[in-house]
Amino acid sequence: MTSFITTFDAYTYIIIGYYLLAKFITLFKTNGTVIANKQLAPNTQQLVIKLDKNDPAYQAGDFYFVSFRGSKSIGREKHPFSVTSAPKNNSHEIAFTIQKLGDFTKKIPSVQIGTRVYLEGPYGQFDRIIRKLPKDQPLVFYGLGSGLAPLLSLAEQYGNQRQIKILWSSSKKNGLYFEKALEKLKKNPNITVIAKEGRFTEESIKKNCHQKKLIKGSTLSWDQLMSS
């Protein structure tokens, strides 16, 4: 009898745990509607979603787990995407710049205008960390491949407030698929963009970034971002 009660209690706690987890996740569930879906380049699609009126706004550099409703061609599975738009322009319209490199992302062009979207999030720490830095401190963003996406959002948000240098490298196979977005940022005199196919070497990073600024500046690891 004691063993049964112990087992029953354990299952009860597990069920309650799953229930609380599900309730917690729904707090971060956001709804929206696709208002634009256009091709920027042969392998690049831009998806714009308008959040529902009472749903929370996002911060620069955030990401969401995105799933679609009512689109038979793409299904309902969730996939993470980083925001490339800036909330200063419209905090309830989110743009995702998506590389069509996998089975799921290749179906993004089939998503129709008006499709309902569930977004789990927003998640992210970049904006909060930057806001804690001295306002006169320059920022150096180094992105690899699609990792540039949240950095585009941050550069757009803070480009009029800080000096920003963006280093971006992409594989030769995929090419410089964010080139158009970077060209727009280059028009801002506060933003410097250096893009290349293939990785930057340590020497090329030192050449393009003043070494003293790199040493004096803040360095953030992924573990620090997740624990902040």
Image (cartoon, rainbow, N blue to C red):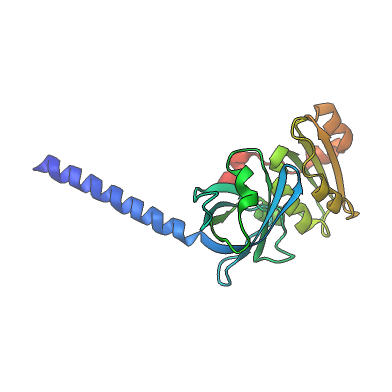
Furthest residue toward bottom: 53
Is residue 138 at all visible to an observer of this figure? no
Location of residue 174 with respect to 151 vertically, above or below? above
Name which quarter of the figure residue 36 lies in: bottom right
Residue 77 image point, x, y percent? 50, 48
Residue 104 image point, x, y percent? 58, 43
Residue 204 image point, x, y percent? 85, 30
Name which quarter of the figure residue 47 lies in: bottom right
Residue 211 image point, x, y percent? 85, 35
Is residue 180 at all visible to an observer of this figure? yes
Name the one closer to the observer, 110 or 98: 110
- Image point 70% across, 62% down: which residue? 87
- Image point 88% across, 36% down: which residue? 208
* 37 left or right of 156 in image: left
Name the one closer to the observer, 199 or 96: 96
Location of residue 30 with respect to 73 vertically, above or below? below
- Image point 55% across, 71% down: which residue? 54
- Image point 77% across, 41% down: which residue? 177
* 111 left or right of 7 in image: right
Location of residue 109 with respect to 221 vertically, above or below? below
Q: How many marks?
A: 0
Image quarter where the N terminus lies is: top left
Name the one closer to the observer, 65 or 48: 48
